[in-house]
């Protein structure tokens, strides 16, 4: 199983855009790799972030046949959360997919 | 199209009875157990899956959605018990009981709720036991595992409410199943005497509670622990 980095970035931006439309938050309609996903500068509250992560997992499974769990212990124990920004989240997902492919 | 219910532990006992009951009502049923299942029905689909195995649970729940349809009802029935005096309880018993009863319930709930959150919601029923409220001697670890399931049920009900998912638990009295076949009769008699209604439970008692939690009108009922036999 694999996915190109730019395809994955597009997927995350699409999900954020849909969330933005649902929530009425224009800043989520145009995002880039530096867009914060949590913290004081993020437009997402904690439940929005839960929904965002769940949506990524489900779409990777449904559309790309990639079955991974994003919220695992390695992500939670890092000093720098992979969910800090869109770009770091993309890198983390690529890392998880590579790891699963090598198991 | 009929809705799909996923039931864990359908090979025998209560899980099997629930599967047959829902099939008779026109549901599509997917079920799992660690070993093969001889339940044959055109609308029954079996998966060999250990509910405490994270990878297996993820694969099973995603396969159900891809090959059948999204899950509308999850019934976390799979469970194991072991009677022993606390001082003679091996660590392995503790680990096995918590892995199946608590970890299994958690993993199934987590993966299914993710799916339900995208498909308009659903109903989740966990299984506890009167062993917890009655503080049954000889069942310390089993009762502790069910206390954990009850706590998980109540908190999950709050966290998942906004996703239109209800989470409740049924706490049956002893029923004639494999779980109690090795328990001495005096022990069962003494347990039944602690119930308001003093008899063994039946599968029908449990099916009635399942029907109640999954009926459309029960969408305002969540986070509840329903003990049978008048135990509270």
Image (cartoon, coloured by chain):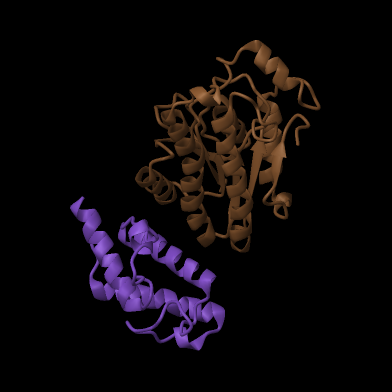
Task: Tell me, yes or no, if residue B31 can be seen here.
Answer: no
Viewer-closest of B211 and B109: B109
Residue nearest the viewer, comparing B139 with A97: B139
Q: Is residue B126 left or right of residue B227?
A: left
Residue B161 falls in image quadrant: bottom right
Q: Residue at x 34, y 84 (%)?
A: A34
Using the rendered image of the protein, determine whether residue B202 is visible from the camera's viewpoint. yes
Q: Colour of chain A?
A: purple
Q: In the rendering, at what x and y percent does residue A81 appear?
A: 36, 70
Vertical comparison of B112 with A78: above or below: above
In the displayed structure, A71 sits above or below B12; it is: below
- What residue is drawn where x is 54% and y is 26%? B86
x%, y% of residue B31? 48, 36
Residue B52 occupies quadrant: top left
**Colour in which chain B is drawn:** brown
Residue at coordinates 59% horizontally, 60% vertically from top-left?
B159
Q: Residue at x 55, y 14 (%)?
A: B182
């Amino acid at each position: 199983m694999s996915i190109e980095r730019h395809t994955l970035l597009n997927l995350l931006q699409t999900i954020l855009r849909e969330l933005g439309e649902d929530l009425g938050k224009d800043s989520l309609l145009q995002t880039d790799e530096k867009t914060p996903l949590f913290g004081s500068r993020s437009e997402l509250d904690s439940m929005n972030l839960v929904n965002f992560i769940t949506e990524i997992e489900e779409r990777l499974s449904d559309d790309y046949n990639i079955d991974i769990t994003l919220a695992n212990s390695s992500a939670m124990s890092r000093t720098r959360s992979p969910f800090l920004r869109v770009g770091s989240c993309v890198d983390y997902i690529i890392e998880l997919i590579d790891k699963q492919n090598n198991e | 199209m009929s809705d799909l219910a996923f039931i864990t532990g359908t090979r025998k006992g209560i899980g099997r009875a629930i599967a047959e009951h829902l099939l008779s009502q026109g549901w599509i049923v997917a079920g799992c157990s660690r070993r093969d299942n001889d339940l044959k029905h055109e609308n029954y689909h079996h998966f060999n899956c250990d509910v405490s195995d994270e990878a297996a649970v993820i694969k099973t729940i995603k396969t159900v959605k891809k090959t059948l349809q999204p899950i509308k009802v999850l019934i976390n029935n799979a469970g194991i018990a072991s009677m022993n005096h606390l001082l003679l309880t091996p660590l392995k018993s503790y680990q096995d009981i918590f892995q199946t009863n608590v970890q299994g319930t958690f993993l199934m709930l987590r993966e299914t709720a993710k799916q339900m959150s995208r498909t308009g919601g659903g109903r989740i029923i966990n299984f506890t036991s009167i062993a917890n409220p009655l503080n049954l001697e000889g069942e310390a670890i089993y009762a502790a595992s069910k206390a954990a399931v009850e706590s998980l049920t109540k908190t999950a009900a709050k966290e998942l409410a906004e996703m239109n998912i209800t989470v409740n638990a049924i706490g049956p009295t002893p029923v004639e199943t494999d779980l109690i076949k090795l328990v001495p009769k005096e022990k069962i008699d003494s347990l039944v005497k602690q119930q308001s209604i003093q008899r063994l439970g039946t599968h029908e008692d449990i099916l009635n509670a399942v029907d109640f939690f999954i009926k459309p009108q029960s969408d305002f009922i969540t986070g509840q622990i329903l003990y049978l036999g008048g135990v509270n």
